[in-house]
Amino acid sequence: MKRIDSIDVLRALAIIFMVLCHFPVNLSPVDGQYPWVYFFSNHIIGDFAAAIFLVLVGVSQVLSSSKTGYVPISAQFWKDRAIRRGVLIFVIGLIFSMLMRGWEAIFEWDILTLIGASLIVIRLLGRLPAFGFLLVGLIFISPSPFLREYSQYLQHWGNSMTTVPGINEILPGILYDPTGEYVPTWSIQEIVEGFFVEGYFPIFPWLFFPLFGVFLGKASFMQSQEKTPDTRLHIVFMIAGGFALSIIGTVISFAARTKPPLSVVNEYISPFSFYPSTLSMQLLQLGMVLILFGILRACYDHGARESVWLTYCRRLSRYSLTVYVLHHAVMLWPMWLIGGIAEGPWDQFYAQAINEPLALSLSILVMILLGPALGVWDRVQGKFSLEWCLTKLAGAGPARYFFAQTISCG
């Protein structure tokens, strides 16, 4: 079936943003000599990659199910392909955290565990209408500040929040980061709290984004057979809605600039923050996703010409899970190896290895090299990629398209 090029390009951009963010964040100091390079990588592009990925999880599930139609879950729900795939991605997320950061990080609740959980939730919600998914998604946003206050969120994130270097000199109090990385524990209570509230990508509020993606997919791509969809009108609404949400989020953040840093944890009206994810940041992220998606739909979904760029984006999109895991290995394992050989702790060079421009340059080099590397993988039909392994383990079912290929509903 025909691919939807706008989704391939959008997912590829999310991968590019992610790689360009992760190298400086993991290899360079947060208070280094080049705060604006760090700010660009971590916040200008980095803050939007996760939101794009998660929204596309939901959109892809809609497109996938449109191929087969709705299939009820049997009494033996563990045999359901979509649920099996969600469980496998969840387990891959746990193994990934362990392999990249050690045993103590297995319950850090990275984005892969969130994606796995979201696939299961989306499947269980079944035939809810578009607005039903939106309303359920809002349930995961609304109590988040109260849950963070109850769980004493900052105890696991350095105990305080700090303004972001660079931007703080121009707009004081507009953007906050925690003073430390998330520190997971093996306490049953804190493992559960980490999954739901405190981890890198907890269910509250991050599950909203995949559920919004289902809403967006149903509203944009699932049309009654009696109607001819006005794609241009959809695109206008997406872009206009994106601008509106972005402006509202920015206004909220500006209005809260004089509030104490703790407001990002336990209040709705608070400055921008990614960890924890504040309402102002969620609105800005969602708005930017809609704007970018709308522009790409206008550019690519109406007879876009073949190009090297489009081929590159399709490959990145097709192997997004593999690229996600491999770029972490390329980035982290050499640093752990050198730290283990040298005197001192094995992670002694984390966020201290090289300066920000060099780290950003390395990330660009990795993205350039991925082009021919994925081309070789394509020629062997992706054999032994993580997407290929996932399909072999779970079966080629409706949920495969987030990490494999994107189909149209036409």
Image (cartoon, rainbow, N blue to C red):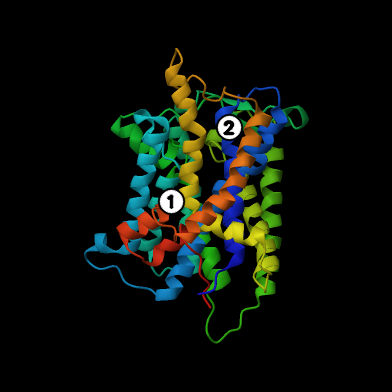
Residue under numbered circle 2: 25
Residue that appears at 30% across and 29% down: 187
The part of the image, by quadrant, that contains residue 151 is top left
Q: CA distance from mark 2 to mark 1?
A: 22 Å
Front residue of 147/330: it is: 330
Front residue of 69/5: it is: 5
Front residue of 166/337: it is: 337
On the question of residue 12 being in view, the answer is: yes
SS label for mark 2: helix
Q: Amino acid at mark 1?
A: Ile
Counting from the top left corner in percent of width and height, residue 379 is at 49, 60
The part of the image, by quadrant, that contains residue 395 is bottom left
Q: Residue furthest right?
A: 170
Mark 1 or mark 2, which is nearer the start of the sequence? 2
Say if 3 sits above or below 267 in the image.
below
Q: Residue furthest left?
A: 76
Residue under numbered circle 1: 115
Counting from the top left corner in percent of width and height, residue 19 is at 58, 42
For residue 333, the mark is: none
Q: Amino acid at mark 2?
A: Val
Counting from the top left corner in percent of width and height, residue 190 is at 35, 32
Front residue of 396/77: it is: 396
Residue that appears at 66% across and 60% down: 308
The crowding category of the residue bearing disc 2, from other C-alpha atoms within 10 Å (few below 14, some 14 to 19, many at least 20), is many
Q: How many marks?
A: 2
